[in-house]
Amino acid sequence: MSSQRPNLQANLSQTCSSRPNQPQGNGGSNPQNRPNYGNTPPYSPHQFPPTDASTDIGSSGGEESRPPGWYLPKGFDVLTLATWNADALLQTPGTPTRRRKFATLERLVRRNLIAVIQETHGSPAQWEELQRKFGNTCKIYHSTIPDQRGAGGIAIFVNLALLNQCPNRPTATTLIHGRALEVELIFPHSKLTITGIHNHLDTPQLETSLAEHCARTTSLAQADPYGTHLHIVAGDYNFRNGDSPTYRVSPDANRRTEVTTEPSPSDRTKLKKWLPYTSVSMAHYHPDPTRIGHTTNATDGNYAHASSIDRISSSLLGWQTPTLEMKIDIPTPVTDARTTCDSDHVPVLLRIARRKQRAKNDRPIPKWVAQHPKYKEILNARLDAANIPKETEPFQALQILKHEIRIASKEAIKEIMKKDPTNPHTRMQRVLQISRAIAYNDPQLARIVKKADPQLGECFTVSEDGLIHITNTTKFNETTAAIAKAFHDQENRENDSAATTQGKKNRTNHLKRLNDQWSPFSRKSVNLTITKQDGSPTTTPEEGGAALSDHWGQVFSHKDIDLCLADAILRRYANPIDLQHVHIPSEASFSAFLRHAKHSAPGPDGIPYAAWNACSSHCSY
């Protein structure tokens, strides 16, 4: 695979740094110190940077501080990125419009490690002033159209705390003046590449070249043998891809009506140009419109319309997602944008966080294990051997049951995966195991997978010092995707054969979201979130809980009432209920309930209903 950049018009390379007196470029003047950008992956993050970088500001230090399977340096467990078309950010100085736009920009820069801003406009003097304004919080990389201060312009704001973790100066490359800019941040053990685009190009050739460049850079990131190179493309794509509708907006901007979900002919033309990139990248999908435009020469009159053309995509692959928490949102409805920042555009926010690895005894029991006949056989044999006395105190008996349920699940997993290694469930578990092994640097687990699944095992090696190295990234990516497809196909067949219920519908939607992340073409990450009363989305579990509490708090909160009046109403209108012949539900009733709740999520203890159902004959306490 060629590492050359596309032959783009007015290609200009700018190398910038927030710290003076460092070697030029990515590895100093010595070519041996430079990362390899040839046919091999673009950076070997588990080899230390040049020797003079080990004492540099922000260096992570020794081998023991390496953050395995993660894209940011130690101390950064969450990657936050925003993209926003600022709609002539630096024009009309001193006006209320500009002040509101700057307030939006300051929020984005303050709350995100990286902010990609399009249509900035501006003169060199204005950019110098902007850098002074944000100099204590971030470094600004920007590109403008020469001699056109009132058109185009793109900037990438990078948080200084993150920037200072780069042992050598980051590079910023103008791919197309004022339209496409790329920043490479190389950390001691990982690499992050950000490509910002304002896809309003003069010639089709430029757009084709830009799409091909993004595809090459993403493919290089996916070829990293350690899984620690991430490429993100963010910005204004300037076309709709048909996966979210266009809305007609009412004159008062308070209502919107769906018009169409089909892309226009010009959108289809652009989609075809970007196919080389969209076929290898993962789209972080958000259904809400981000832009208000104006339709002219419409048969039923001109009107304002809202659509989604501001997007974020990444090089993430399906096998990398199980250890990540990903969320993409817009901070406010697009119909409110003009009142909040005097723009017809709203930002798009991406949040990628590392999942904390649970202790083995705290991990949920997979539902497919709890529903497997082998698990029921092993569990009941253990419970028969335990022979819990009937007079055992209920809480104590419950603890014994939970202990036996967990032990039985571990034994069942070993038996099932050993006796049926080609089963789609078994192979999918091996994929999840190697994903965890790479993400959390677990060489013991990687060796288990290598021995148990030869097809997967021949794609990676584990060194004597415990370093996991993917030796054939193409085959590894294709094999994991094929295994996931076989697993999801089986899950869909089982779900289709089930009775039609709301649980089945939810399960179908869940399986579709999972399958989208593994699709060999047009991968997509979709998230669900809770919105606040002002319409903005929550970004953390704590915010979600607070939003639910705010919404339902008044319903369930204590309310003072007239007790005498309530008593009089009850005596007159309420029918008394005789509870003398009411009994606790029988064991058969509980078993019937558990059978219908087999797809319900487990509670905090990680034990699904299906696991309790497997030991129903021992639960009559």
Image (tube, rainbow, N blue to C red):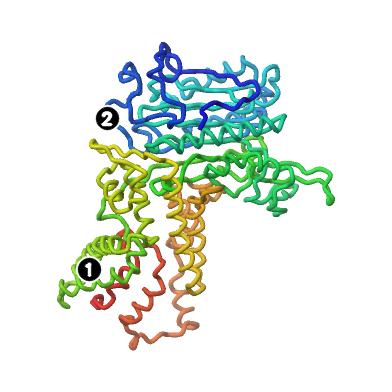
Q: Amino acid at mark 2?
A: Glu
**How far is mark 1 from mark 2, CA to CA?**
43 Å
The part of the image, by quadrant, that contains residue 429 is bottom left
Q: Viewer-proximal residue, 396 or 610?
A: 610
In the figure, 278 relative to 586: above or below? above
Please give the count of numbered marks on the rendered protein.
2
Q: Viewer-proximal residue, 561 or 360?
A: 360
In the figure, 485 relative to 327: above or below? below
The part of the image, by quadrant, that contains residue 601 is bottom left
- How crowded pointer 1 is (Cα within 10 Å; few <14, some 14-19, many 20+) is rated as many
**Residue 299, percent from left and from top:** 84, 50
Specify the quadrant that holds the C terminus. Answer: bottom left
Taking the spot 37% from the left edge, 78% from the top edge, the residue there is 592
Where is mark 1, residue-wise?
401
Pick out the residue farthest to the bottom. Answer: 581
Marker disc for residue 63: 2
**Residue 497, percent from left and from top:** 49, 72
Taking the spot 25% from the left edge, 32% from the top edge, the residue there is 64
Pick out the residue farthest to the top. Answer: 21
- How crowded pointer 2 is (Cα within 10 Å; few <14, some 14-19, many 20+) is rated as few
In the figure, 162 relative to 561: above or below? above
Element type where label 1 sits in the image: helix
**Residue 505, percent from left and from top:** 52, 66
Q: Is residue 518 visible?
A: yes
Pointer 1 or 2: first along the chain:
2
Residue mark closest to the camera, 1 vs 2: 2
Q: Is residue 503 visible?
A: no
The part of the image, by quadrant, that contains residue 608 is bottom left
**Residue 543, percent from left and from top:** 44, 47
Q: Amino acid at mark 1?
A: Leu
Q: Viewer-proximal residue, 455 or 202?
A: 455
Taking the spot 42% from the left edge, 26% from the top edge, the residue there is 186
